[in-house]
Image (spheres, rainbow, N blue to C red):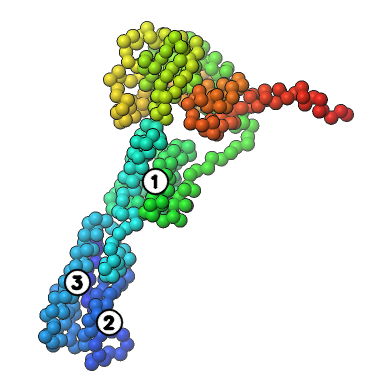
Amino acid sequence: MGRPKRLYPLGRYRLHVRGEIDPAKQYLVQLEYTWNRQVIRKGMNIFVRLGDWNEKANKGRGGVRASYGPEANRINSLLLARVDKIDSFLAEFQQKHPNQITEQVISDLLADKPLTREDKGKDFIEFVQERLESDYSRNRIGRSRYENGKSGMNIFRIFLRATKNGTYKPDSIYLGEISVELIDEYIRWRREIKQNSDATINHALTPILKACAYASEMKMIDHAVNARIQDMRITSKISLSDEDNEFDGKYLSKEQMSALLEYYNTCTEPRRKEFLEMFFFAFHACGLRVVDVMTLQWGHVNFEKKELRKIMIKTNKRHVIPLTEPALHILHRWQEKRAGCRYVFNLVKDDLDLDDAEALYKSRNNATKCINQSLAVVGEQIGLSFTLSMHVARHSFAVFALNKGLSMSVVSRLLGHGSTDVTEKVYAKFLPETLSAEVARLKEDFASLEIVR
């Protein structure tokens, strides 16, 4: 076995001798470090004749002989103090920033420049999590996005460890070491190993890209690198096939909704029937998100005004939803079963603290997984070509409402979107019936403009 590689270099002194050797000439003493096959030197402003130099002096660091004169001891003490100081700085730097010593670091030390990394030695994952904390505390993001972001960075740690891309630790990397190549490898890893969809990967990239943009503003990473990283989001491919235009598998048609209702009426499994009631409630309650279904409390429901008032978990904003008769009917059924309980549906424990982000996140994941597993079986039994989930109820309501002539702005408000831009981006492709109906309104005026043959 060979000797293990040193974690940092040690310096030694040499005379700067070039060309033909002249015994009478005095040569410059240089402090020399060798690292990664590169030699870094710094002159000491001390000149010594070749005969007065001893390479083995000062514990092998190099120094002057007694023949140098009465200043020999002082010069050797000065040389040894200097090399020991640089060596100790390198040892300290290695301890604080493992595996980050470069030729530039050594050169800066020899030039007595302050050692400051542009990224201040900041861990990248910690930096992203701090930005998430900041955005969440200022209500820039909702709790769901906050928790998803933290979960995504935990997966990023797993990626670093699994692919051996960690630097100073197996699952850690400095902020300044983030590169386009690393993000590209992360995207491939999530696709091939985690089997994530492009949409899921884009969600995972969001906090990373935002953190990189902020770091660039703070001059902690290179502007050019950040500009390239910001372009790493996956662009969805647009399909022009008839099948994609007619149906993309994200919502239920009226016929499919009727088939689901028929399944519910004949279902003999009590818990599955309850899950279907929750699905229908989410649909009739204007596409209520699953996390808001599970955290719905009786105090949020006003039966007299036929409305639901609740702070939405994702947006952290109060939202008012008018309740239709089918939604009220489902609530009355559950009122009989859940009298005296805090939450309407038995998806979470009554002692769940909504201010406990970690507990809420775990409860949401458990509840969603449980419901969606059951709904997936139902979807297969009624012949759906896609996986039925609670979120399908939200899409189904939006498409149904738009195709019944409700304006985009109204549907946006009912869904609780921050702006109509979000609604249009998601649902613009679901408007064939609405567009046809709008054009039909022009039929009478168009008739008078028809070309007569």
Residue 436: which quarter of the image?
top right
Q: How far apart are the two marked residues, 2 and 1, measured between alpha carbons?
A: 48 Å
Q: How far from the left and from the top, in percent, is residue 165?
A: 35, 51
Q: How far apart are the two marked residues, 1 and 3, measured between alpha carbons?
A: 41 Å
Say few, some or many: other residues with alpha carbon within 10 Å of mark 3 (under 14 / 14 to 19 / 20 or more). some
- Which residue is disc 2 drawn over? 16
In this picture, residue 74 sits left or right of residue 351: left
Q: How far from the left and from the top, in percent, is residue 80?
A: 16, 73
User: Are the residues flagged by discs 2 and 1 in contact, CB closer than 8 Å?
Assistant: no
Q: How far from the left and from the top, in percent, is residue 102?
A: 31, 63
Say few, some or many: other residues with alpha carbon within 10 Å of mark 2 (under 14 / 14 to 19 / 20 or more). some
- Which residue is disc 3 drawn over? 82
Q: Is mark 3 on a helix, strand or loop?
A: helix
* Above or below 7: residue 390: above
Q: How far from the left and from the top, in percent, is residue 157?
A: 33, 44
Q: Residue 211 carries which label?
A: 1
Q: Is mark 2 on a helix, strand or loop?
A: loop
* Screen quadrant of the N terminus: bottom left
Q: Which mark is residue 78?
A: none
Amino acid type, callout 3: Arg
Amino acid type, callout 1: Ala
